[in-house]
Image (tube, rainbow, N blue to C red):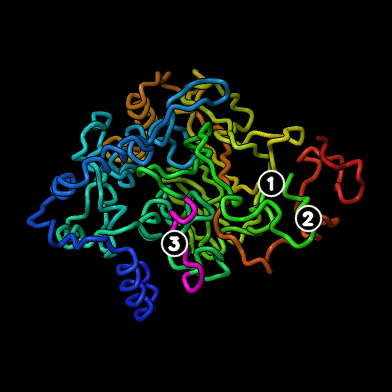
Amino acid sequence: MKRLFMSGALFSVLLLTITTASALAAENDHSYYVQGPMDSGPDVTAQCLKCHEKHATDFMKTTHWTWGMEQEVDGRKVVRGKKNAINNFCTSIAGNEPRCTSCHAGYGWKDSSFDFSNAGNVDCLVCHDTTGTYVKEPTGAGNPSKRVDLVYVAQNVGKPSRYNCGTCHFYGGGGDAVKHGDLDSSIEYPSREIDVHMDADGNDFTCQECHVTKDHSIPGNSLGVSPGGTSHFNCENCHTEEPHTQARLNKHIADVACQTCHIPVFAKDVPTKLSWDWSTAGEEGHKEEKDEYGKHAYSKKKGHFKWGKNVVPEYLWYNGSASAYEVGDKIDPDKVTRLTYPKGDIKDETAKIFPFKLHSGKQIYDTKNKYFITAKVFGDGGYWRDFDWDKAATLGMEASGTPYSGEYGFAATEMYWRINHMVSPKEDALSCLDCHDDNGRMNWKALGYKGDPMDNPKYSRSK
């Protein structure tokens, strides 16, 4: 439990490690079945497959393995996922695989030749380690660090914990809280104030308590990689449709998601990245700066950043589906391109007002072809090594199979990330005046209302 140990809470860490390992341990003692030596991840998987071949087969059908799924987005049937989506963080995975795939639940995805049909490449340990000692190489294409005792980890496997899920989901985008404003290292062992469900001294929910898993398929869709995904669940899975004692509050449920009132802010403990401007990367004259949170405000390799803490969400209508930019889609560089955003409006009976993190960016695009570039930023020829955008664009577009004109510029983008975690205790939920006040947080007109619906019944949503 290295991350917790670094906080200094030694006794709590030792107690948590023992308790977690005991609670999540496999039903059978795997030290009897699993024997060394093991020199690589595939060596471990070879032994796992002797008993768990079906589990591997099931897992290989899931998006945690494929990083893509067939879905309908904006009326188009596409195969989309992490492996081929454009984002406004590092732009794309194409050409950057050894770095990005350090979060893949497999071994050896270093380029487009990776064999997705080979069960021997499945990484069982990243989800089933109970020791807290399993670590992947940050730039190793998903392979484990050489310092990991693979025999020890393999003999102590069990059910996934928040630690396992957080290894990737807390640190996506290259660091703690970079992508998700509501998923970061504070969720690993949270207080009640950070998340009332995962409160380590209270409910102590594991992720799969809500993300109920069947045949290794885990429900839940991110707008960015699965905008057309239909594997949804919501608070009503556990709570009734009228959970409040006050009828007026229960009436809100038709129009307002539970998360809107019960997650007043996100990034409660760890700052989250709110914007990334690539256009200033590589410029001379800027000094490496840090902001009030101790986070990089400027980095020569990456440009300017903005971070936020205790961030008030953006509020939009959402009907369970999203729109998204696909590689090769034309853009208007004079306008902000929304790479992914929720669908729904005030007239959509299936939509509710949900909270979102908005991440803005300024990223490289092809000025002649008028579409965004899948830039190679990592490794040989990558921007982080050579500070040459033309070379980074050429190599990255070759990797994604997209033509590049040789001319580039930078254009503004936005991405929306749905907020579901960091649920506050009920006493900290939004009150009436947080929304229905002259200086309330809701932008009623942007949501399609003529004004605050509490002020005039005529302003209410049209059904």
Tell me residue 33's x, y (percent): 13, 56
Question: Can the viewer see residue 234 in this picture?
Answer: yes
Tell me residue 122's x, y (percent): 24, 42
* Mark 3 and mark 1 residues within 8 Å of each other at the beta carbon: no
Q: Amino acid at mark 3?
A: Ser
Q: Residue at x 54, y 41 (%)?
A: 361
Classify 342 as above or below 425.
above
Q: Which residues are magenta?
A: 200-211
- Left or right side of 366 for 437: right
Label for residue 315? 1
Main SS, magenta residues: loop
Question: Is 126 or 359 nearer to us in this picture?
Answer: 126
Q: CA distance from mark 2 to mark 3?
A: 30 Å
Considering only order in the chain, which callout, 3 or 2, is on the residue closer to the N terminus? 3
Considering only order in the chain, which callout, 2 or 1, is on the residue closer to the N terminus? 1
Q: Amino acid at mark 2?
A: Cys
Classify 276 as above or below 26.
above
For disc 3, the marked residue is 185
- Left or right side of 442 for 405: left
Quadrant in the picture for residue 215: top left
